[in-house]
Amino acid sequence: MKKDYKEPQTREPFLIGTESPIKKDEAATESAGTQLPKSLEGGHFSDLTPDGHADRAARLNNLGIAFAQRFEHSGELRDIENAISVIQQAADLTPDGHADKAAQLNNLGNAFLRRFQCLGELRDIENAILVNQQAVDLTPDGHVDKAACLNNLGNAFQSRFECLGELRDIENAILVNQKAVDLTPDGHADKPARLNNLGNAFQSQFEHCGELRDIENAILVNQQAVDLTPDGHADKAAQLNNLGNAFLHRFQCCGELGDIENAILATQQAVHLTPAGHTHKAAQLNNLGNVFLCRFQCLGELRDIENAILVKQQAVDLTPDSHAHKAAWLNSLGNAFICRFDRLGELQDLRNAILVNEQAVNLTPDGHADKARQLDNLSNAFSKLRNSTGNPQGKLINPSSPCQIPVPVRQGQESRWGMMGWETPVGYNKENMLC
């Protein structure tokens, strides 16, 4: 079953390299600034700062941050490629023991992680873990950036776990994310985002191991993240989405009605707080549909399946065909139509289910892990149509189980990033560059 969207982990902000104060503003790293000076567009920093200049590494680091920040706005792969290139140069030019070395390694790890999330190349997540671990090792206990470096390392471990499923990675993610939380004082601006990331890690471990204590811990820390985040904060919706996912997990495990009520409440709040056009709006609507569908399965209230179809249709309508999750959300909408057909017997619901399940199948390439499940759901819809109308089109179709309820996919890293990193969403919640 498809997981609900978990907001991406929040990445820690890029760490700005130190440089003589009179030159500090040339980093041009304001989060709103996506324009690079013309002279820097191609990364030709050597034209301005000669080899051997004392500030060359710091300026390369800051240029890399500017490329990375523009990537967050533009999504252009060349920007993250340039970020990796120039931050790598900065790290190579900086001797071990230099005050800026850990910050540069941290930034390089964040850039590798972002490219991994775009391209899925295993070497990028391996490199991210390697350099983030070096950043942690070089940062002394008590340093103001220690928690940020730990948080980013935890995000990288969690991303590799989502890719490879090695239990040691999620255990390491929980370990270092917990350290990051413990080192962050109450009242610190980044405390909620680090709690959110820790909650995402507990949810991932619960999904893998099924231990109730993991989902209990996830609810505890995700609730703390929500409580510490003021209304109007950009990360509030992502944190509510992740809390809703955690409540849904516990409901599916224990069957307590209070958990599904809390899941609906939190996920509705997430949807209402997310503006139209936001990149996570469709995912949150799909998640809200999942919790309505789950309550319908429990209580049989018709309004819940009506609401599930309504918001799942909105999620599909907001999602372009090229989006990685379009097929999954079409499949999920088809399941909701089947559920309503099973309740009311309206043939139009079966026809709608067939329509959207066919779209899901057509959008899913052969060999994809979800293809068989989508074909099975389409078969189920045709079989029900044949049994209801005598339509021979269903004669080769094997029926499968009826109404399927997806298990939640967290927001980041979609997960998962369900809010990671420099920091930018892994739900997304962002903690951002260390200045």
Image (cartoon, helix red, strand yellow):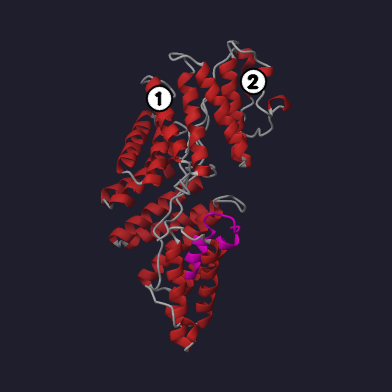
Q: Is residue 87 above or below residue 304?
A: above
Q: Earlier in the sequence, mark 2 or mark 1?
A: 2
* Residue 344 sits in quarter: bottom left
Specify few, some or many for label 1: CA neighbours under 10 Å numbering under 14, 14-19, or 20 or more.
some
Task: Tell me the magenta residue range.
Answer: 315-334
Viewer-side residue, 188 vs 46: 46
* Amino acid type shown at disc 2: Asp
* Badge nearest the viewer, 2 or 1: 1
Does residue 74 appear to the left or right of 412 in the view shown? Answer: right
Q: Quadrant of the C terminus?
A: top right
Q: Distance between the Cα atoms at labels 2 and 1?
A: 28 Å
Mark 2 highlights which residue?
25
Query: Does the segment drawn in magenta span residue 322?
Result: yes
Q: Which mark is residue 173?
A: none
* Amino acid type shown at disc 1: Gln
Mark 1 highlights which residue?
134
Viewer-side residue, 233 vs 288: 288
Question: How far across and how far down the image is residue 205, in percent?
Answer: 32, 47
- Furthest-right residue in view? 38
Does residue 180 appear to the left or right of 411 in the view shown? Answer: left
Question: How far across and how far down the image is residue 103, in percent?
Answer: 48, 23
The residue sitting at 47% across, 33% down in the picture is: 189
The residue sitting at 44% across, 57% down in the picture is: 265
Viewer-side residue, 271 vs 177: 177
Q: Is residue 211 above or below residue 47?
A: below
Query: Does the segment drawn in magenta span residue 331?
Result: yes
Specify whether residue 82 is in view.
yes
Question: How far across and how far down the image is residue 145, in percent?
Answer: 44, 24
SS label for mark 2: helix
